[in-house]
Image (cartoon, rainbow, N blue to C red):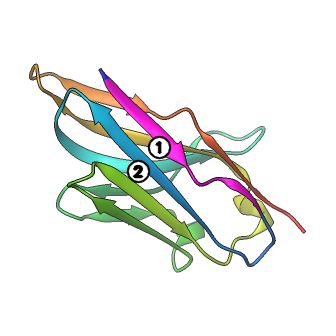
Amino acid sequence: QVQLVESGGGLVHPGGSLTLSCAASGSIFSIYTMGWYRQAPGNQRELVADITKVGRINYADSVKGRFTISRDNAKNTVYLQMNSLKPEDTAVYFCRSQGIVRSGGRYEYWGQGTQVTVSS
C-alpha cells in the first residue's frame, strides 16, 4: 500500500507563483517516476511534468520555462514550482507515482488532487 499526500494548491493572481509538493509513503521499495498531471473542467487529464529516479525530466510544452519539477529521493517527495501562472493553468493537479513495493510488485498510485486557481 502506497499513500500520496499533496499540498500547496490555492488561489493566485496571474503572474504569481505556487509550489506543490507530494510525499509518498507506505510499503515502498523503490520509486521510479513521480510526476504531476492536471485536469481542468471538461478536459482530459494531461501530463504537466514528471521526473525519474535518476533525474530525467519531461515537461508539457505549455509549462516549459515557467514550471520546475524537482525531487528529494531521501524524502520520497516531488515538488512542482510554478511561476508566471496563467488563468489557463487553473486545474486540479494530481501527483502520480510509479515504482516497486517491498513485496516485489509494481505499483502506480495517484494523489487525491489539489486545486490550483489562477484568477484576478
| Residue at (19, 26) in percent of width and height | 106
Does residue 10 belong to the magenta stretch? yes
Q: Which residue is mark 2?
A: 35
Task: State which quarter of the image contains the N terminus.
Answer: top left
Q: Secondary structure at mark 1?
A: strand
The CA span between labels 2 and 1 is 6 Å
Residue 12 in the image: above or below residue 66:
above
User: Which quadrant holds the C terminus?
Assistant: bottom right
- Seen in the picture, residue 60 relative to 67 is either above or below; the reply is above
Provide residue 82's location: percent of width, then percent of height. Answer: 58, 69
Instruction: Inspect the image, locate mark 2, and give the three-letter code of the amino acid beneath it.
Output: Gly
Percent across and percent down for residue 99 are 22, 36
Magenta-drawn stretch contains 50: no
Q: Amino acid at mark 1?
A: Cys
Mark 1 lies on residue: 95
Residue 30 position, x and y percent, is 15, 40
Please give the label number shown on residue 9.
Answer: none
- Circle 2 Cα neighbour tier, 10 Å, few/some/many (<14 / 14–19 / ≥20): many
Q: Label 2, secondary structure: give it.
A: strand
Q: Considering only vertical position in the picture, is 15 above or below 111?
A: below
Please tell me in which quadrant of the rendered image residue 25 appears. top left
State the residue lying farthest toward the right: 120
